[in-house]
């Protein structure tokens, strides 16, 4: 087996390998792989490797390691590293390939000062953990010293059979509306104050990538933004996490989340209403399948007809 450094010349071949192993559940697109695994500034090149079969010269496995490296006034995960993905073809398992790839990733993360490694949950992640049905993968990582953490995370799915023209919900002393580009500074200031961290980070990237505001429904009270809901579709400026697996849906996919309400205004039903507003906006764009990703709030969203679609077990490892 040969191990070569991370290089986007292999992107299409790695995409083929992914789809060979996972495509029926998590269909990969070259654009998504480039976005998440090659263009992300947080990829640790020294910890990301490709295993090449010496005979066929084709990739048979790969690993992507990340830690926070962006020069922003935000930091995701101080002392945290991530294994974004570790995949070995079924035909080449049991030969030590996965252990070698993982060792290279972990060693590079240690050298970056990482104290704890998480599986998934990285910036531009694919998964918030190991797909729960992958019992063999969970068992393998447990043998490598990884431990399961608390509850399962869920991707939820809602499906609508009939098209509809719907009105946004009403709210006393305020309104729901889509953002515009002119709202960028005010919206980022709201996120920085109320939801610093990952959601703020994702919004900064959204505007950097040319977002116009159409992906955010906000609720305003007395002219001030007090809540938001992110909505995604095929026309969004980058492939967002709740529409990663859109190829599974012949008639397209929309996504909802993240969402949040200023702590001072909670308890008024605005959280559920902002989700309803996001659903209305997507359905008015002709979208009949909607995913809400990475949540434990299954009962909350069940009130709107959403059910658990995919589940993920969270795993981590503390370096001794």
Image: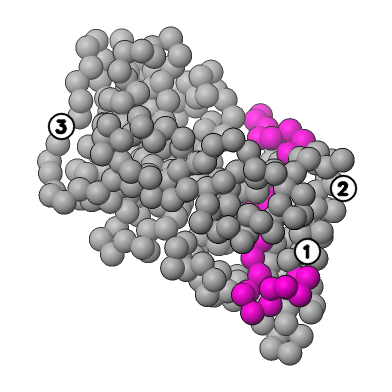
Front tag of 3 and 1: 1
Q: Residue at x 77, y 49 (%)?
A: 145
Find disc 1 in the rendering and name its residue: 99
Reading the image, the residue beneath label 2 is 111
Q: Using the rendered image of the protein, determine whether residue 273 is visible from the camera's viewpoint.
A: yes
Contact between marks 2 and 3 (CB within 8 A): the answer is no
Image: 48 above or below 181? below
Secondary structure of the residue carrying tag 3 is: loop
What SS does tag 2 mark? Answer: helix
Compared with 61, 234 (above or below) is above
Identify the image quadrant of the C terminus.
top right
**On residue 151, which mark appears?**
none
Q: Quadrant of residue 225?
A: top left
Give the labeled residue for mark 3: 167
Q: Position of residue 254 (x, y in %)?
A: 33, 49
Calculate the distance from the C-alpha at mark 2 to the C-alpha at mark 3.
54 Å
Between 246 and 301, which is closer to the camera in this rendering?
301
- The picture quadrant where one finds residue 37 is bottom right
Query: Which residues lie in the magenta part?
Result: 72-97
> Is the residue 222 above or below the residue 298 in the image?
above
**Distance Cα–Cα, label 1 vs label 2:** 18 Å
């Amino acid at each position: 087996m040969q191990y070569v450094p991370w290089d986007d010349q292999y992107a299409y071949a790695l995409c083929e390998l992914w789809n060979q192993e996972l495509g029926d559940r998590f269909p990969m697109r070259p654009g998504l792989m480039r976005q998440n695994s090659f263009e992300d500034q947080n990829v640790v090149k020294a910890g990301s490797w490709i295993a090449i079969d010496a005979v066929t010269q084709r990739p048979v496995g790969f690993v992507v390691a990340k830690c926070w490296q962006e020069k922003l006034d935000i930091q995701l995960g101080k002392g945290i590293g991530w294994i974004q993905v570790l995949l070995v073809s079924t035909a080449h398992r049991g030969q030590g390939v996965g252990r070698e790839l993982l060792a290279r990733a972990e060693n590079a993360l240690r050298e970056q000062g990482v104290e704890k490694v998480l599986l998934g949950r990285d910036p531009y992640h694919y998964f918030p953990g190991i797909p729960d049905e992958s019992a063999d993968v969970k068992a393998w990582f447990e043998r490598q010293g990884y431990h399961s953490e608390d509850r399962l995370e869920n991707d939820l799915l809602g499906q609508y059979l009939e098209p509809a023209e719907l009105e946004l919900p009403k709210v006393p002393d305020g309104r729901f509306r889509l953002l515009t580009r002119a709202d960028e500074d005010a919206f980022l200031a709201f996120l920085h104050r109320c939801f610093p961290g990952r959601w703020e980070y994702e919004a900064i990237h959204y505007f950097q990538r040319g977002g116009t505001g159409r992906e955010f429904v906000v609720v305003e009270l007395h002219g001030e933004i007090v809540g938001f809901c992110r909505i995604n579709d095929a026309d969004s400026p980058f492939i967002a996490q709740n529409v990663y697996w859109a190829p599974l849906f012949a008639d397209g996919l929309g996504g909802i989340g993240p969402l949040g309400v200023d702590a001072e205004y909670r308890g008024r039903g605005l959280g559920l209403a902002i989700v309803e507003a996001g659903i209305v906006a997507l359905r008015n764009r002709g979208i009949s399948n909607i995913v809400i990703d990475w949540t434990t709030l299954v009962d909350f969203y069940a009130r709107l007809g959403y059910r658990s679609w995919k589940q993920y077990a969270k795993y981590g490892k503390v370096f001794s």
